[in-house]
Structures are given as structure tokens and as C-alpha cells.
Image: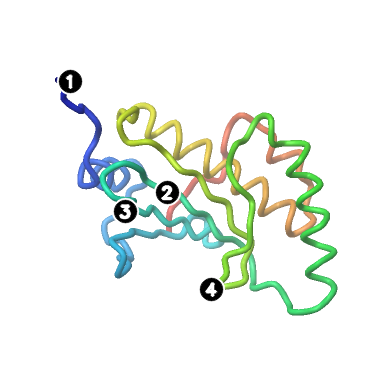
Amino acid sequence: MDRCLCMTWEEIVNVLSEFLMVEHWNEGDDGSYSVVIDDVIDVNFIPVSKTYVIFQGCMGEALPANNSAEAKLKQLLQWNFARIKDNNDVLSVDQRSRRISIVRKILLEKLTVDSLLDHVESFVRNVDFWLAAAEHKSVAAGLSPLLTRFHVK
């Protein structure tokens, strides 16, 4: 019988703490850990049993409950369709906060320290792209392979 060599949740949190230079996490009642990157991107790391970890990035202000939110979401979903072949993250609206949210689900049994760090970098890069798109900034900067604004506050 093969033994699982996957990372534990504690190992993941330790690696993320060191990589993101986080001394004090915001801990949720569900066992999640969250941090704010660049003062605008809320990133949550959520354990799902001992099988998966979910990355969730929420950005921007709450969407208004009017037609302007619908138009904004329609445009973002059109851009998402064009990017889906390169980014399998799910674009949605967080039901509690009504903020645009990006979600990535990662299988722990395939996770190594290197792949975890790659996931964090690519995930934050993708959330940064959607933040720029949601704020109608130039999205060309978000296509850069280098994440130049990666600072944790």
C-alpha cells in the first residue's frame, strides 16, 4: 500500500508564512488563514478535509445591487472566456461580501513546496489581472510573467 507523501495543512501554512513574510495570520472559524496583499487583494487559504486546499482571492468593493454590476460582470465573464484556456481558476462573486472572487482548488497529494510556491505566485498574478480588469485599468500589465507588485502588508 502506497503512503501519501502529501503536505499537511500545517506545513502549507508554515511555507506560506515564510514565503509571504506573514507573522500574524487572520484565522477564520473554518480553519482558514487570510492575508491582504498590496492592500487590495484579500487572499484566503482554506483547508478542505485532508485532500484539498482552496485559494480564494477577493478584490475590490462590494458590487452594487443595480444594473451597473450586471454590466461589469458581463464584461468580466467575456474576458474570462478568452483566458480560460490558460487559467483554470474560477471567476465568481463571493455571496457573503458581494465582491468579485477568484477560486483555485488544489489537490494536496500532488503538492510539493515548489509547486505550492508556483501556485501562490500564479494565483496572485491572476487575481491581480482581474483586479486591474475590474477597475478598468490597463489589463496588459496583468499579462506580464513577472509579478512586480507582490508585497504583503
Q: For numbered disc 4, what is the local secondary structure? A: loop
Q: For numbered disc 2, what is the local secondary structure? A: strand
Q: For numbered disc 3, what is the local secondary structure? A: loop
N-term-proximal mark, 4 vs 1: 1
N-term-proximal mark, 4 vs 3: 3
- State the residue at coordinates (65%, 30%): 86
Q: Quadrant of residue 129?
A: top right
**What is the distance, in whole Å, between disc 4 and disc 1 at their CAs?**
41 Å
Q: Which residue is mark 1?
A: 2
Q: From the viewer's perspective, is the residue at label 3 or at label 2 nearer?
A: 2
Q: From the viewer's perspective, is the residue at label 1 or at label 2 nearer?
A: 1
Identify the amino acid type marked 2.
Answer: Ile
Q: Residue 113 in the image: x percent, y percent?
A: 30, 30
- State the residue at coordinates (33%, 30%): 111
Is residue 4 placed above or below 67 in the rendered structure? above
Quick one: label 1, few (<14), some, or many (20+) residues within 10 Å? few
Q: Residue 105 in the image: x percent, y percent?
A: 46, 43
Q: Residue 60 in the image: x percent, y percent?
A: 63, 65
Q: Which residue is mark 2?
A: 54
Quarter of the image that includes the C terminus: bottom left
Q: Which residue is mark 4?
A: 96
